[in-house]
Amino acid sequence: MVILAPLLFAVTPSSADFNGIAMFPIGKSVYIESPATSEDVDATLKDVQAAYVGLHRAFSPDPSFQPIVFVCRTARCKVAFGATPQAAPASDLGFAAVALADETRDRAVVVTGPNASTARVLTHELVHARMKTWASYDALPVWFNEGLATAIADEPSCANFEPSSEIDVTALVTKSEWQTHLETTGQPLRAYCQARYATEAWSSFANMRELGAKARAFAVAAPQSRTTTSHRSVRLEKSPRLSNGSQSSKQ
Ligand SMILES: [Zn+2]
């Protein structure tokens, strides 16, 4: 049974071609790169379930939110969905900026799996996808987008990174500013963790549900949310005010 399983899944008539990669559906809007064993499929389904549990700690389940999850098993698959050849081999790579030709790109996420970090990485990417339903990624500061996803998913782990005053991540507003910082410091994990601490400080972090509510309110109020076509991010205050009026704002 186990030996035959990869062949069975590889030739399943319902497998579909995405950007030249054969993927087959294993659940509602969940695809895994073919071929995969039945063990891979079972592990992936558990990871997806765990990832949504993580997401729902901050954001209430919403039937209208329908992300598409692509689980890549090879670097080639990740490159086909938009990863750089340099980043693609990493077993913990996930991303929400997916190279798809149609509007599904806005709710698609890619993760590597199944492996030990797949569930948490998927939660991180699902946070990005969820936030994009309220504001485009570029409409919010990158440190905030990444800090929020890192805080909710606990991915990447910040167990080895204490808050530091040496870098001010809130100056990293655009994708290019963020990327340049990661490349010049060579300490991407530190940047993600500083972003997490900055986001938690911004929200007066009390619990995940409150963090999610404040992040949503911030995104809904962001200028050009949903309709922006510019890659130029809106530069916001370091302690952005929430404008929904129902919660106390930051100091
Ligand atoms: Zn991210």
Image (spheres, rainbow, N blue to C red):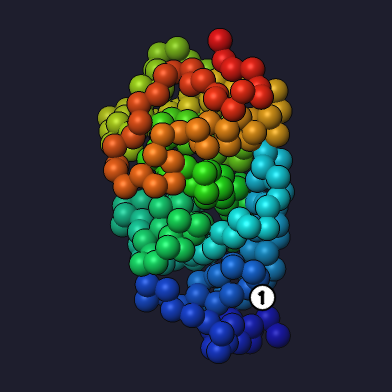
Residue 175 falls in which quadrant of the image? top left
Residue 23 image point, x, y percent: 50, 75
In the image, residue 45 sits, relative to residue 148, either above or below, namely below
In the image, residue 245 sits, relative to residue 33, either above or below, namely above
- Describe residue 33's horizontal placement relative to residue 56 as left or right: left
Which residue corresponds to mark 1?
A: 38
Q: How many marks?
A: 1
Residue 146 appears in the figure: no
- What residue is rendered at 49% in x and 59% in y? 108
- Judged from the image, the secondary structure of the residue bearing numbered disc 1 is helix
Residue 51 image point, x, y percent: 65, 51
Task: Look at the image and tell me in which quarter the C terminus lies.
Answer: top right
Residue 214 image point, x, y percent: 61, 29
- What residue is rendered at 48% in x and 21% in y? 240
> Is 218 in front, or is 75?
218
- What residue is rendered at 44% in x and 79% in y? 17
- What residue is rendered at 64% in x and 83% in y? 5
